[in-house]
Amino acid sequence: MLMLLARSIWRKLLATALAAVAFVLVYQASVIDSQRAGVEPMSAGQRLSAGVKAEFVATAYCKGERTASGVNVRAGIAAADPGLLPEGSVVHVDGGPEQYRGIYTVMDTGPMVRGRHVDLYMWSCYEALDFGRRPITLTILRLGWNPKDSSPKVK
């Protein structure tokens, strides 16, 4: 087999091209799979509403000046999938370190924030990297901007 490759430059090029295509396909498959790691799939027809507790995965971000809603970034802002938690939603985060528990307003979206994933804004990028990826329990206090979609009783 090696003698066949040694005789022709075209065979060498073909073998190299096939190896490169195989590498790209394997790399793409692993990148796509790792993007959804730890995110629970949503069941069809499942809707979140005010007062509901749900399991989410939390990460943190630190870059940017303005959110998707047009406000400046600051502590207490979160990014979420707009199909699940629309802009203006207010959530209470439980789980994780004590300093990150509390109330956040969803004012941002992101291409990597899909499904049961929430991205919490932190001023320090070092702090955001240390936060990593962790499971949290999220209580929805208000879904979107409408005050009528608020939880009847906040504990």
Image (cartoon, rainbow, N blue to C red):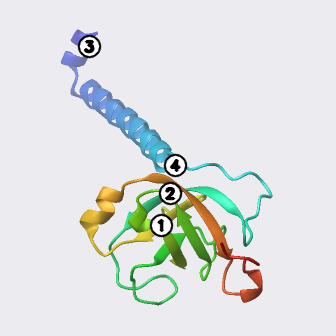
Label ID, residue 77: none
Mark 2 is on which residue type?
Answer: Gly
Residue visible at 48% across and 46% down in the picture? 32
Give how far across and how far down residue 112 sits, in percent.
Answer: 48, 61
Instruction: Give the CA separation, mark 2 to mark 1.
Output: 7 Å
Give the mark toward the camera: 3 or 4.
Answer: 4
User: Which residue, given by chain and number where applicable, does mark 3 sit on?
Assistant: 4
In the image, residue 133 sits, relative to residue 26, either above or below, namely below
Give the mark toward the camera: 1 or 3.
Answer: 1
Query: Residues at badges 4 and 2 in contact (C-beta under 8 Å)?
Result: no
Mark 4 is on which residue type?
Answer: Arg
Query: Helix, strand or loop at disc 3?
Result: helix
N-term-proximal mark, 1 vs 3: 3
Picture quadrant where residue 18 is located: top left
* 91 to the left or right of 10: right
Instruction: Give the CA separation, mark 1 to mark 3.
Output: 64 Å
User: Which residue, given by chain and number where applicable, does mark 4 sit on?
Assistant: 36
The extreme right residue here reads 45
Query: Residues at badges 2 and 1 in contact (C-beta under 8 Å)?
Result: yes
Query: Helix, strand or loop at disc 4?
Result: loop
Query: Residues at badges 4 and 1 in contact (C-beta under 8 Å)?
Result: no
How dense is the environment of label 3, judged by Cα within 10 Å: few (below 14), some, or many (20 and up)? few
User: Which residue, given by chain and number where applicable, does mark 2 sit on?
Assistant: 95
Give the position of the C terminus as an image quadrant.
bottom right
Mark 3 is on which residue type?
Answer: Leu
User: Which residue, given by chain and number where applicable, does mark 1 sit on?
Assistant: 101
* 75 to the left or right of 83: left
Instruction: Give the CA separation, mark 3 to mark 2.
Output: 61 Å
